[in-house]
Amino acid sequence: MGNIDIREFLQNLEKKGGKTKGGQYTDLVLGSLVSFVNSVVEIIEEIGVSIKESSSEVPKAKDQLEKITQETELAANNMLDIVEKILSNIEATNNNINRIRRGLKVFIDSKGNLIDFNSEKRYLKEIQTYIDEIQDYSYSLLNSLQFQDITAQQIRSANFILNSIRIQLNNLLSNLYNIEKKKEKIEKEDFDYKATIKNSTERQSLADNIVENIIKSSNIK
């Protein structure tokens, strides 16, 4: 029953309430009931307006969250590309250091240890230490890039909730105003609303693959 039908029903009910010759209601309870229901109808109409406004804002919020997801994904991918280039340069540098070490060893052996290269050895060792630290920092950064996966998972969860609320609000509006319901169903999305750095594995797997490839393609000791 829509709001117009309710008002007509209440008016008819009020007329049939019965009056005495003195013009007073014989059924005070019925009169109070009519007044109460009238107030409820007004409140429901106000709620309906609020629901319409809220329902129209849900798609905007969903789009904004989706935009955030795309921007964070783009930023994370750019950072990942930079880290991969750093690791590639580290690999090349390590290979060159190993070549220098081998060449230095051959040269020292050929001279019968007549020349002291201890300083050069120490410098090479220090350079290797710095490179190892940079490599460790790069791996840590790769691991930290899981934040994008976590953010995306949580935003998908928020979008799912928002869309569910929108559908429920539309159903409520349909019931209030006798509007034919649109056939909508909540689409299931693949997301983990409990996603954290500890249980996100995609980035970690990618980082592990990069590390394994570097180790396989170089003789880092």
Image (cartoon, grey):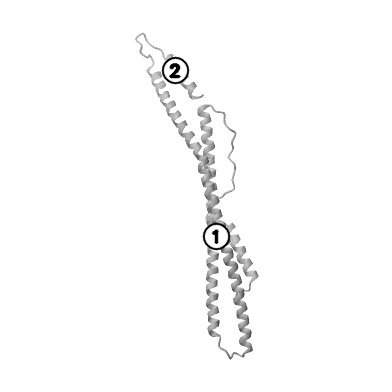
Q: Image check: 36 left or right of 109?
A: left
Q: Look at 53% across and 69% down and name the residue there.
A: 134
Q: Nearer the viewer, residue 114 or 213?
A: 114
Considering only vertical position in the picture, is 179 above or below 133?
above
Outermost residue, right direction? 217
- The mark total stands at 2
Local secondary structure at mark 2:
helix
Local secondary structure at mark 1:
helix
Q: Nearer the viewer, residue 49 or 198?
A: 49
Q: Look at 50% across and 28% down and name the residue there.
A: 176
Q: Quadrant of residue 143?
A: bottom right
**Rendered-image quadrant of the C terminus:** bottom right
Q: Nearer the viewer, residue 215 or 64?
A: 64
Give the image location of residue 144, x and y in percent: 52, 60
Outermost residue, top direction? 21
Give the image location of residue 171, x and y in percent: 53, 33
Q: CA distance from mark 1 to mark 2?
A: 69 Å
Disc 1 residue crowd, few under 14, some 14–19, many 20+, Cα 10 Å: some
**Residue 149 in view (yes/no):** no
Of badges 1 and 2, nearer the viewer stands 1
Residue at which label 2 appears? 11
Q: Look at 57% across and 89% down and name the residue there.
A: 115
Q: Look at 46% across and 21% down and name the residue there.
A: 7
Q: Quadrant of residue 36?
A: top left
Residue 79: image tag: 1
Q: Image check: 75 left or right of 30?
A: right
- N-terminal-most mark, 1 or 2: 2
Q: Amino acid at mark 2?
A: Gln
Q: Amino acid at mark 1?
A: Met
Labelled pair 1, 2 in contact (Cβ < 8 Å):
no
Give the image location of residue 160, x and y in percent: 54, 43
Q: Image check: 66 left or right of 47?
A: right
